[in-house]
Amino acid sequence: MKIHFIGIGGVGMSALAQLHAMGGDEVTGSDRLISKGYTDMALWDYLKKLNIKLFPQDGSGIDRHTQLVILSSAIEEDNPEFVKAKALGIPMMHRSELLAKHVAEHRTIAVSGTSGKSTTTAMVYDILAFAGLSPSVITGAAILSLQKEQGVFGNVYKGESDILVIEADESDGSIVKYRPHLGLCLNLQKDHKEINILQGYFKEFISHCKTAVINAEEENLRVLAPQAKTFGLSLGDVHPQEIKTDGFGSDFSIQGQPFRLQVPGLHNVANATAAVAAALQMGVDLETCAKALNKFQGIARRFASVGSYNKIEVVDDFAHNPHKLGATIAAAHLRGKRVLAFYQPHAFASIKLLTQEFVDSFAKHIGPEDHLWLTEVYYPGGTIPQGVSCRSVYDGLKARGVNVTYDGCREKLLAQMAAAAQPGDIVLVLGARDPTLTDFARKLLSLLKEPKEKDGCGACMLGNCCMAYKK
C-alpha cells in the first residue's frame, strides 16, 4: 500500500510513517520545514534509510498511485496537499484514526495526561522490555535506550509480542478514539482546552479502557473515575515513600522496594510511580521495575545536558506548557546555583489560552537571583491569530517583578544570556516543536566558550526570529 503523510516531521506522524515503512508499505511524506529549505535534520536522514521519500508540502509527493493520505490536526483544508488529495479522490485519514487501528490490534497501554506522557510512556516501555515482554511502542519523543541499543530513531519500535505502549494525545480530542487494554491517566490541567472540555475527553477515554489507572491526587481526574485503580506521590494504591531528590536523580521506595532514578525532578518520581503502577497491572514485579528504572536513560530533549563550560551547564528541554515549565525549572534548581532560562512558546493558541497560567508558573519558579528570557512564538507556517504575542507574558511578569527580558529575535538574546552566566548556573533552553532549538542551545554553549557580541541577527534560523510573526 502506498501511504502519504502530510506533516511527516511531526513526532507522532513520523512514528506511524516509520511503523508502516517497517511493515512493508510504500511510504512518502511532506513537511513545511522541507518547504522552508530546512533539510539538514537527523529525522529526515533516518526516514530516508527506511526508503521513505520526502517532499516539500506543495502536492508533489501525492500522485494517482497514492492509496491513502494521513494528516494531523495542524493541516488546514487549504493546504496544497489536502487540496490535491481531495481532487484525486484519495481517501484521507487523521493520524489518530490510524493509531486507533494499531491500538485495537494490540493489548495496548495508553498513557494520557496533560504533562509527562512521553517520559512515562518511555518508562513503561523500558520496564516491559527489561521484563522480557517484547512490547512495541509508539510515542511522542525519541526513547534514548532505543536509539542506543537498537539503532533506531527512537519514537517507534516493533516488538514481538501483542503488547503496545502508546502516548494518547488529548490536545485535539483524539484521545476518545482509543480503546486500550489499560489506560494510564497522569494528570489533567488546563492546556490546549479549558478544563471542562478536557474532562469530557478523559471521561470518555476512561470509559473505553478495560482497566484504568489514575492519579489519586488529581481531583480533575478522580471525580471522573472514583472506582479506578490509583497511584500518586503520597496517595493511591501505588505510591513512593522516603523520597530524596538531588540534581541528578532521586531515591525512593515503593512497598519496601528501593528505587534509584537517574533523571532529576520530583515530577519524574511521579512519572516513575505511574509507570510502576501500569507495569504491576501487566504482571511485572517491583524488583524488576526497580532494576529497569535504574537503567532508564530518558528521552530526547528532556533535561538533556548539551554540555558545560567553566562550571556553567546548558540544558535543552521540551517543556512548553506552564506545568511542564515549572517542573523543569524546579528540577534545575536542584542542580544549579541559579537558573537562567530561555523560553520560546510553541503555539499562538497556547499563549492565547494560557497567558495568565504562564505568568503564574514563571513568577512562582523564577527566583529573585534567576533570569528569564522570552522570544516570540515559533512560526512554522499557517494561520496566526491577530494580536497574540509572547509580549503578553512578558508584560505580566514585569508587573509581578520577575527578572525577565523579551526580544522578538532570539539571536539577539544569546550574547545577553552568555554574559549573564556565572559558574554554578544552569542555563535552560525551553520550548517545543522547533527542531532548531537544540542547535540554539549548542550555539549558546559555544558562545560561553568564546563570548563576543553579535551585531544584528544574521544567524536567524527558519525565519523564526525578526518577527516571522506578523501582527
Image (spheres, grey):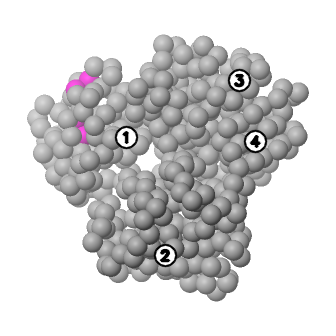
For marks 2 and 4, the one nearer the N-term is 4
Q: Which mark is residue 250?
A: 4
Q: Are marks 2 and 4 in contact (CB under 8 Å)?
A: no
Q: Which residue is mark 2?
A: 416
In depth, the one of 166 and 143 nearer the eye is 143
Specify the amino acid type for callout 3.
Lys
Q: Amino acid at mark 1?
A: Met
Q: Name the residue carrying label 3.
A: 291
| Mark 4 surroundings: few (<14), some (14-19) or many (≥20) residues within 10 A | some
Label 1 or label 2, whichever comes before in sequence order: 1
Disc 4 element: strand
Residue at (44%, 78%) from the top-left corner?
A: 407
Q: Amino acid at mark 2?
A: Gln
What's the distance in space between the residues labelled 4 and 3, CA to CA?
A: 14 Å
Q: Residue at x 37, y 27 (%)?
A: 19
Amino acid on which the number 4 mark rests in the picture: Ser
What is the crowding at mark 1: few (fewer than 14 residues within 10 Å), some, or many (at least 20)?
A: many
Residue 466: horizontal and vertical position, in percent? 32, 76
- Mark 3 or mark 2, which is nearer the start of the sequence? 3
